[in-house]
Image (tube, rainbow, N blue to C red):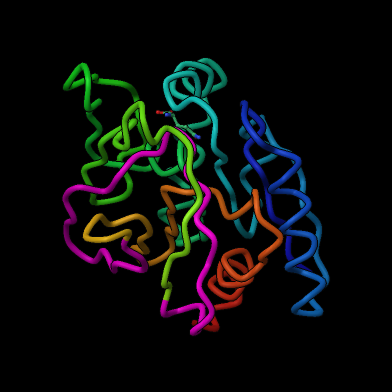
Amino acid sequence: MVTIGVLGLQGDLEEHVDITENALEKLSLKGEVLVVKKPEEIEGLDGLIITGGESTVFGKVSSRLNVFSTIKQLSSKKVPLFGTCAGLIVFARNVYDRVVGEINQPTLGLLNVTVSRNYFGRQRESFETDLLVPILGDKPFKGVFIRAPAIEEIGENVEILARLEDIVVAVRQENILATAFHPELTDDTRFHEYFLKIILQET
Ligand code: GLN
């Protein structure tokens, strides 16, 4: 029995809950998926997901709710964390905005990457494209990009999982999985299954 939390600050929570439940079913795993907000709801989790949304809002709300230190404690115990889009930004060590430059927004700073917010600019604010993600097998994964960031610099222990042309768009660093796109907005459960396998330590 595993308990997965979806950090309920803002963003596409229900989609993550639904697809994680589907992934549990696909792997015939017993588990529950909860929307969590308070430090005491986060502490005992087996895995935590941070959704897409607006990363600057996450920073503000989470410092008010005091959840960043609890998430850092989880991570120090190697509890798996999964961030999509704004979630990736919240994990990143360094963040800047393509338009306004350095932004000093609060982040967890757990993932050794530099992320560029809103990387794909106006013309391509939202688009879908097939991505090759070798850890998920040969079948391409539909990348849904919505005002998406890009991973521009990669530090120690960071494994590249997917690129869009030469831009890094999915990474893993030990217990942390992060994508610039939104697997939760597809019917494809493979990224969430992979996350569950990290929880089960089967990867
Ligand atoms: N552009 C948003 C940000 O910087 C992320 C968008 C998303 O999560 N779809 O926070």
Q: Quadrant of the N terminus?
A: bottom right
Report the residue at 73% width, 57% height from top: 19
Report the residue at 57% width, 20% height from top: 65
Check the image and report above or below for 197 versus 68: below
Is 155 left or right of 21, judged from the image as shown? Answer: left
Instruction: Looking at this view, name the residue that lies furthest to the front.
Output: 123
Report the residue at 17% width, 21% height from top: 101
Magenta-span inclusion, residue 141: yes
Is 70 left or right of 132, judged from the image as shown? Answer: right
Numbered label tally:
0
Q: In which quarter of the image is residue 160?
A: bottom left
Q: Looking at the picture, how far across and down is residue 109, in whole percent? A: 30, 40
Is 179 left or right of 3, judged from the image as shown? Answer: left
Residue span colored magenta: 134-163
Q: In which quarter of the image is residue 32?
A: bottom right
Report the residue at 54% width, 48% height from top: 182
Q: Looking at the picture, how far across and down is residue 47, in whole percent? A: 60, 57
Check the image and report above or below for 33 versus 57: below
Q: Looking at the picture, how far across and down is residue 126, in whole percent? A: 48, 37
